[in-house]
Image: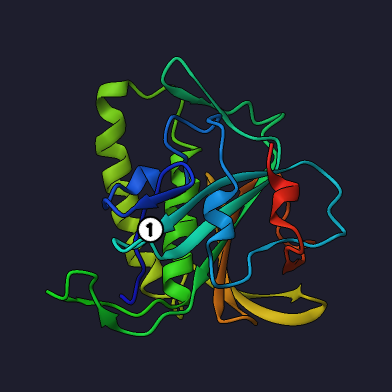
């Protein structure tokens, strides 16, 4: 599958292949984020449009080995928190949507010149969104010793699903992007929903959420990313 680097840390982070970090900042979901990495991106960031009036917050950006920012996430709603090593998800209050922006990049040489990095695509956005959803919705009753095995299994499944966007359980959902109806690939699971598509500005857009319906959402370029900073 065409993909981008899968993980990052606070601010700008290099990829380390850690699936659980794909949608969660280093130090946990409640860790403080810096806007600095977002400001280094050469592409526009997307978030929910102005019809959404709730809380907005930064998550993380992911960068290549040479420091080039390749993707990042912005959060909307009630931010999931980590307590005692587990994600708190009271389904009565867990209402959030995360928007993932991925730079549309061609096949290119690695920073050290020893290999080739695959192109990014809508599948890249779907993968990041799917793994991000898993990172903040894993079963709270699960023993910590079993958590990594569960994440590895579910992340592998999310990877396979992202590579088959034209097959079930994906369907097409049309949502406005900058006011223009745009087709996204969309799927639901017991953990929440995931969608992915492309937008203007040379980017692919993914999103995931729980407790907030995707059907009434719209996306737009974030005019001032510092407005998301805590």
Apparent side of residue 56 relative to residue 64 in the rendered image (left or right): right
Determine the image quadrant of residue 110.
bottom left
Residue 165 in the image: x percent, y percent?
45, 76
Identify the colour scheme used.
rainbow
Mark 1 — residue? Answer: 158
Question: Residue at the spot x=63%, y=70% of the render?
Answer: 44
Query: Dot 1: few (<14), some (14–19), or many (≥20) neighbours within 10 Å?
Result: many
Determine the image quadrant of residue 32.
top right
| Position above or below: 188 against 82 | below
Q: Nearer the viewer, residue 209 or 75?
A: 75
Question: Residue at the spot x=56%, y=50% of the render?
Answer: 36
Determine the residue located farthest toward the top in the rendered image.
Answer: 84
Q: Secondary structure at mark 1?
A: helix
Residue 126 in the image: x percent, y percent?
47, 66
| Position above or below: 3 against 147 | below
Determine the residue located farthest toward the left in the rendered image.
Answer: 114
Residue 206 in the image: x percent, y percent?
56, 65
Q: How many marks?
A: 1
Question: Residue at the spot x=82%, y=43% of the render?
Answer: 54
Q: Quadrant of the N terminus?
A: bottom left
Q: Quadrant of the C terminus?
A: top right
């Amino acid at each position: 599958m065409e993909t981008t680097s899968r993980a990052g840390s606070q601010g700008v982070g290099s990829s380390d292949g850690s699936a659980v970090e794909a949608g969660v900042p280093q130090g946990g979901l409640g860790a403080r984020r810096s806007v600095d990495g977002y400001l280094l991106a050469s592409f526009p960031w997307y978030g929910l449009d102005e019809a959404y009036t709730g809380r907005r917050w930064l998550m993380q950006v992911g960068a290549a080995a040479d420091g080039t920012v390749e993707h990042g996430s912005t959060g909307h709603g009630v931010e999931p928190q980590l307590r005692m090593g587990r994600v708190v998800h009271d389904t009565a209050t867990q209402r959030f949507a995360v928007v993932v922006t991925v730079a549309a990049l061609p096949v290119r040489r690695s920073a050290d010149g020893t290999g080739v990095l695959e192109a990014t695509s809508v599948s890249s956005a779907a993968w990041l969104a799917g793994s991000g959803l898993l990172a903040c919705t894993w079963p709270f009753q699960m023993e910590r010793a079993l958590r990594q095995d569960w994440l590895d299994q579910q992340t592998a499944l999310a990877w396979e699903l992202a590579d088959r966007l034209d097959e079930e359980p994906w369907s097409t959902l049309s949502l406005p992007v900058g006011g223009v109806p745009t087709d996204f690939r969309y799927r639901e699971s017991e953990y929440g929903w995931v969608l992915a598509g492309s937008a203007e500005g040379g980017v692919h857009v993914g999103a995931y959420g729980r407790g907030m319906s995707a059907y009434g959402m719209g996306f737009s370029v974030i005019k001032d990313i510092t407005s998301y900073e805590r």
